[in-house]
Image (tube, helix red, strand yellow):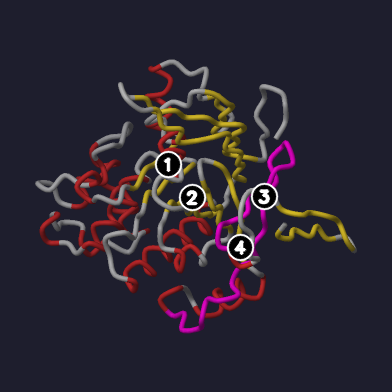
Amino acid sequence: MRETDMANPDYIVECDNLVKIYKTRDIEVLALQGLELSVRRGELMAIIGNSGSGKSTFLNMLGALDRPNAGRLFVDGKNLFKMSEKELVEYKRSTVGFVWQNNARNLLPWLPAWQNVQTPMLFGSAKDRKKRAMELLELVGMEHKAHSRLSQLSGGEQQRIAIAIALANNPKLLLADEPTGSVDSKTAGYIFDVFRRLNRELGLTIIIVTHDRALAQRVNRVVAIRDGKTASEMVMTEDFRRRLEQSGGFQDMTQDASGSQEEFAVLDRAGRVQISRALLEKAGVEGRRVRMYAEDEKIIIEKE
């Protein structure tokens, strides 16, 4: 991350030392504690973490639904710290699309699917908007449900229509908050296939927040957030990527996903790294002190 106040054109998201504090009369919660993360244009990635780790807070920052307290945040070259309320409204309309876990936030129950999709559209005649809505429904495999209402759709069908709605104004960044949280594993796999298709065919940047680590293994990069900071990254191996492409998608994947990703610890700008409690317990580490030394191009951490 660069020190200047200019965005790097290779990245659609750049955040540096991002801090978010929620205050009430009695308590103060530090949701983000210096988060550092960059997302390349056209990337498909997932963010994982335990409840309270800060992952949904970060997604809300990217969607301009909440403001950071400190740090640096650029999305598509726009400095979200310096944007007015009017500029933020335009940003939410044209730069980002949002898919919620709760389908009631995505769909109007009294409208058929195609009218739901065209509702957020800003430009064009009624004929053009309907044409665009039908194209988007076809893109997510839901053209046959164009005239169905919310009560006539399964959870997975509702979520695919919600994705079409999020694409209505051609966003550059698609944000999905637990998009498979209310569907079964088979449907979740299909929804992830839709995301991969959008990423591959449209070059759309997609960031997915999920608790489902099995599904998170199926994206190109996974960032784990712990205690409001980036703790580790997992990158899909080339071998698994080839197997996935040859199988035709997650719906046809019968192989075990173990070994699909290689995990890396993440150093912050001060050279600090988080070590998970599981690894510390596996090494028998207790207390707050460890021995650390370099050996044969390795850094060794041992219990005291």
x then y, percent, for residue 148: 14, 58
Quadrant location, the C terminus? bottom right
Could you give the CA–CA distance between mark 1 and mark 4, rounded to whole angstroms?
43 Å
Instruction: First in sequence, mark 4 or 3: give its number.
Output: 3
x then y, percent, for residue 7: 65, 29
Nearest the eye: 257 or 283: 283
- Please name the amino acid that badge 3 sits on: Val
* Residue picked out by circle 4: 279
Residue 54 sits in quarter: top left
Could you give the CA–CA distance between mark 2 and mark 4, rounded to whole angstroms?
30 Å
Instruction: First in sequence, mark 1 or 3: give its number.
Output: 1
Q: Residue at x 41, y 23 (%)?
A: 88
- Please name the amino acid that badge 2 sits on: Ile
* Residue picked out by circle 2: 206
Q: Which region shows up in magenta?
A: 252-278
Q: Is residue 86 above or below residue 225?
A: above
